[in-house]
Image: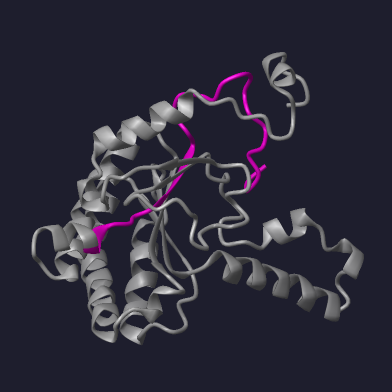
Amino acid sequence: MPGNNQNPDNSLTSRVPQHIAIIMDGNGRWAKQRNQPRFFGHKAGVEAVRGVVKACAARGIKVLTLFAFSSENWRRPQKEVSLLMELLYTALTREVSKLNDNNVRLRIIGDRSVFSEKLQNRLRKSEEQTENNTGLILVVAVNYGGRWDITQAARKAIEKVLAGELQASDITPALIGENLSLADLPEPDLFIRTGGEQRVSNFLLWQLAYTELFFTQTLWPDFSAASLDDAIESFSQRQRRFGRTGEQVENGEGA
């Protein structure tokens, strides 16, 4: 079922996850180490994105979700936020044709209403340009927060109750899940956070419930295909139980 991949194989995970979600952390520190402004690191981070997208496609990963700009990032200095918005626009303008040429489908999640009309149009056109592609699905989360995602899903359910289409008792976890931003995609199998921090920072809170977590000290601009392979190797060694015992998983019970 889309949006619910809690039906693993047997004892160990498949070697390659279907869906990888990444918090790309460490751009500012990477720049500081080189005595450069933070924005220098953000630009280098875009180069890292290009390499990781290529690596994921080559490894048969179906979905890659990147946390590009959180709903909390508006708290950063206004100049940095403005530069990040410009970088997002420029990156989409330059990269979407390459994504299209490589059969990558781009999806954008998050609250777009606060963006400039120019940026909103660029987001929409970038999605439209790649919407018929059948390869890797690249999801970019901008002005996104897990709490926002759950709230908007709950609001949709409440609106149906008020309209008489549902009873309050009809609101179930499955119903909420059907209204989340990634409802039509498998939940992430593997979550990666670069930069040494060990928290999920309001990213895909609902969807990460049973995701395997991988934290690395590597700063995002230095995250390479080899770094990705390290995370996938760690993932492949884990037993995913989803509430069952190890013996049940090994025997294929309750899958």
Picture coordinates of residue 153, whole percent (x, y)? 67, 68
Q: Is residue 25 located in the magenta-colored stretch of the structure?
A: yes
Give the answer, above or below, for where 191 lies relative to 75.
above
Task: Read off the magenta span.
Answer: 1-28
In the rendered picture of this protein, how many numbered marks are placed on residues? 0
Q: Is residue 175 located in the magenta-colored stretch of the structure?
A: no
Picture coordinates of residue 220, whole percent (x, y)? 27, 51
Picture coordinates of residue 241, whole percent (x, y)? 67, 29
User: Which residue appears at 50% of the width and 59% of the height?
Assistant: 203
Give the left or right position of residue 15, taking residue 43 as reference: right
Give the answer, above or below, for where 16 lies relative to 176.
above
Give the left or right position of residue 69, taking residue 242 as reference: left
Query: Is residue 38 at least partly visible in the picture?
Result: yes
| Quadrant assignment, res 118 | bottom left
Residue in the foreground of this view, choosing between 81 and 94: 81
Q: Quadrant of the N terminus?
A: top right
